[in-house]
Amino acid sequence: MSVVKIDNVTKEFRGGTVALKDVSLEIEEGEFISLIGPSGCGKSTLLRIIGDLIEPTRGVATVNGKPARQARKDRDYGIVFQDPVLYDWRTVGRNIALPLELAGWNRQKRAERVKEMLALVELSGFDRHHPWQLSGGMQQRVSIARALSFDPALLLMDEPFGALDEMTRERLNMELLRIWERSGCTIVFVTHSIAEAVFLSTRVVVMSPRPGRISNVIPIDLQQPRVAATREEPRFFELVTQVREALHLGADLDVPAVESPV
Amino acid sequence: MSAIAVERPAERPRSRLLTWLGRALLFLAVPLALWGLWEGYRWLWMNQGWTWPFAVDDTTMPHITDIFGALFKNPSSVSGGGDKLGTLLVKSALFTAKEAGVGFALGAAVGFLLGVVLAQSRILQRGFLPYIVASQTVPILAVAPIVVVYLGTLHVAAWFSVAVIAAFLTFFPVAINTLRGLQSADRRALELMRSYAAGRGTILWKLRLPAALPYIFAALKIAATASIVGAIIGELPSGIQDGLGGKILTFNQYYGLDPTQLWATNVVAAMLGIVFYLLIALAERIVVRRAPENVA
């Protein structure tokens, strides 16, 4: 059974902007899918439709075999945004525990899980810190820990490392892969970076704007597990080139880009 | 993996001591400077015989020492029951503080609830906000006698009528800032709550309210001082003699004879305002846990 099934989804925003037109996509369990494309191609919109944060105008999104709405209500996915979106009146530990609180876990179970999650993102000992005392990269790791704390089968990530410097970004890429392997979850990952998409993914979904659509799906056959040296393999560069060419073919670069309203 | 250095505020006792010394000096320096300005102005104007913007003499600008000295003398124009003026004024201030405190609590509660209710719907905001704003444009001196007379017919204690008038001044900033604060939650933070399938009540309690706290406390600080102004003004038409408002009326009439008494009353009223403000600031430090740059 596929974890995510997008069936002929169209999304029009008020004012007539067509963010997505007739998009279909199936994502299998355990996949790491990157959505890549220029601004306005609807990649964030697609991610939000999967998460039922917005509704499609036409078409159906199915998650874990259920309508996306039901999947959201069942807390089937965790989400990570470009900003960490930590509540700064809560400590790091209580931020990670937030979804657990809402799911009705008791205090002791919450504390145990927070400890595990902090160890997973290598922030043990930081549970009593406040978010503003952490660096941007550390805050984003807290955000990932929060998204995974309740063991969702699906992790949605909207340009999670877009605001970080290159060094931190590459290190967090490695960490994310380790977490993905260990947890066995399915990841849908929105990014602007071709190298990041190729390095992380099992498949790269190339999207193009006006109207937003999928122009190409490129399987990434790099050996698993990916290591730092993967970035230096000839095959890595071939795939990067392939994605880049697909992006340029899909984008009609003459028209000024329209920012996605989401 | 090596963790990135974390900014942990270093607790060095020496520098903390210096900080406190600096604060204490500042705390003393400002009143001393103001004293100097007052006496300097007085001396210059009296010496030169300048009359613009007003003639300076012992009636218009008494010596600061005389104003504070008056606190330790028997009042000349009211029966103090043997009390010094300072004792009398502290008793009056406590009475006014009771009115202002009850009024503040009442107004803050009403304002907060109003803010929460209005935040629930745009239609409610459109319908009620204009009237809430209009309520504040009505001169409090015009409303005060109505409140006193009306509540008087219900056999409510007169001081409580004054508290209601103080509440009338305090609910407004709290309502407006609560509304604004509840709407200040970050859009992504709201999406996060939606992703957790959180209900309206949960979102209010776990996200909107904590996000609103800095706004609410900013309003409470305004309201705390406004409640004292409200209580003093409320005392004027209600014939209450026990509070600072009553004292102000009396000493106003005897100003020509002894101006220091009115000045001393103003000093005590200002002190009361500062105490109210500091209490709210203290509560804020205990309650609000935010990044330093986000504390309003």
Image (cartoon, coloured by chain):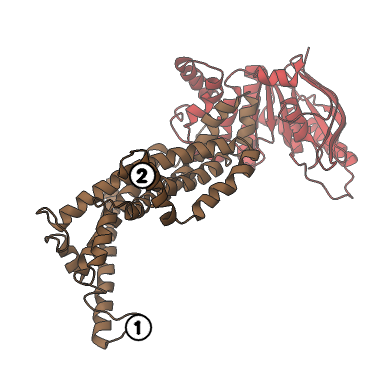
Chain colours: A red, B brown
**In the rendering, at what x and y percent does residue B41 appear?**
28, 78
Q: Which mark is residue B98?
A: none
Marks 1 and 2 belong to one chain: yes
Q: Residue furthest left?
A: B82
Classify residue A56 as left or right of residue B119.
right
Q: Residue at x 56, y 27 (%)?
A: B201
Residue type, mark 2 in image: Ser
Q: Can see residue A186?
A: yes
Above or below, B84 against A173 in this view is below
Q: Residue at x 24, y 52 (%)?
A: B241
Residue type, mark 1 in image: Trp
Q: Earlier in the sequence, mark 1 or mark 2?
A: 1
Q: Which mark is residue B161?
A: 2
Above or below, A226 against B10 in this view is above
Number of other residues with Cα within 10 Å of mark 1, as a class: few under 14, some 14 to 19, many 20 or more: few
Tell me which corner region of the image, top left, top right, bottom left or bottom right, holds residue B288. Answer: top left
Q: Which residue lies under the disc numbered 1?
A: B52
Q: Residue furthest front?
A: B153
The span from disc 1 to disc 2 (Cα, nearest Å) is: 42 Å
Classify residue B121 as left or right of residue A205.
left
**In the rendering, at what x and y percent does residue B265 appear?**
24, 59
The mark closer to the camera, 1 or 2, is: 2
Instruction: Identify the subunit bearing mark 1.
Output: B
**In the rendering, at what x and y percent does residue B284 appear?**
39, 42
Q: Can see residue B285?
A: no
